[in-house]
Image (spheres, rainbow, N blue to C red):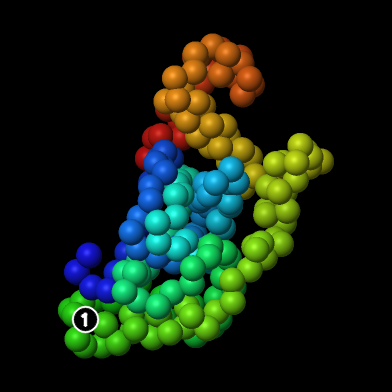
Amino acid sequence: MHHAIEFLTGHAAALSFGKRLRLPQGRLLQVRHGMGLLRLGNREQLLCDGECFWLPADCLAAFTPLRGCQWREARFSVRQPQPSLSGWLHPSPLLEALLDDLTQWQEEREWQGPYGDRLRVLSDLLLRHPLHPAPTPTTLQQEWQGLNQGLIPAEVSEDLAALVAQYRLIRADRQLKGGQAIAPVLAALGYPDELSWQQELACWLQE
């Protein structure tokens, strides 16, 4: 890490399988467009357009951007004052504007200069933002929470269908990498056969 705060952006042209990591920095994560899944403990959090989540240093988590997801994140050295617990942020217009500015930054990224000044302001804003136990209850978030409780909506939106299809592939990948036999894993997840799983996997891995 070159600076006490690092700012990164990313784009997933295809589904990728995130690994659980324990980073030595605090992490402010925001999905700008599309969807991403954040595995934290036994819970799978859904991040949609504009949603922010804070992960403290040494927090074991896996971020999986779904196909088409654009995201950005700031990583904070433990030398920086930061929240000690994880939680959702509802970004203020000022925080959103600052994140946009950092995303579009084209000049030198020097700590002693305008770029570093913005990172320090970001750190100050983070400390002032309250953390929430739940995201904003959008329609997709409510559908996602319902699915986790076994509730099937009467109508399935395009976003929800894409989310469910990719999450099923993610679950298969985790279980197979965990050493489970392929036939019972695919059957439990609702795939008719191995060929169906391979075809769906190839579809979502295609850029």
Count every numbered label the image shows and give the total: 1
Image-quadrant location for residue 25: bottom left
Picture layout, residue 201 above or below residue 115 = above
Picture layout, residue 144 above or below residue 102 = above
Q: Position of residue 40 (x, y in %)?
A: 53, 49
Where the C terminus falls, by quadrant? top left
Residue positioned 47% across, 30% down in the render:
174
Foreground pick, 124 / 79: 79
Helix, strand or loop for disc 1: loop
In this view, which residue lies farthest toward the right? 154
Query: Which kind of residue does numbered mark 1 sit on?
Result: Trp
Q: Can residue 104 be seen at all in this image of the molecule?
A: no
- Kindly identify which residue carries mark 1: 111
Residue positioned 55% across, 76% down in the render:
91
Residue positioned 35% across, 55% down in the render:
23
In this rendering, would 138 be left or right of 54?
right
Residue positioned 73% across, 53% down in the render:
142
Q: Position of residue 105 (x, y in %)?
A: 29, 76
In this rendering, would 99 be left or right of 162?
left
Q: Position of residue 10 (x, y in %)?
A: 35, 57
Foreground pick, 88 / 84: 84
Q: Position of residue 131 (x, y in %)?
A: 59, 71
Q: Can residue 207 be seen at all in this image of the molecule?
A: yes
Image-quadrant location for residue 29: bottom left
Where the N terminus falls, by quadrant? bottom left
Image-quadrant location for residue 187: top right
Q: Residues within 10 Å of mark 1 (few under 14, many from 20)?
A: some
Picture layout, residue 111 above or below residue 9 = below
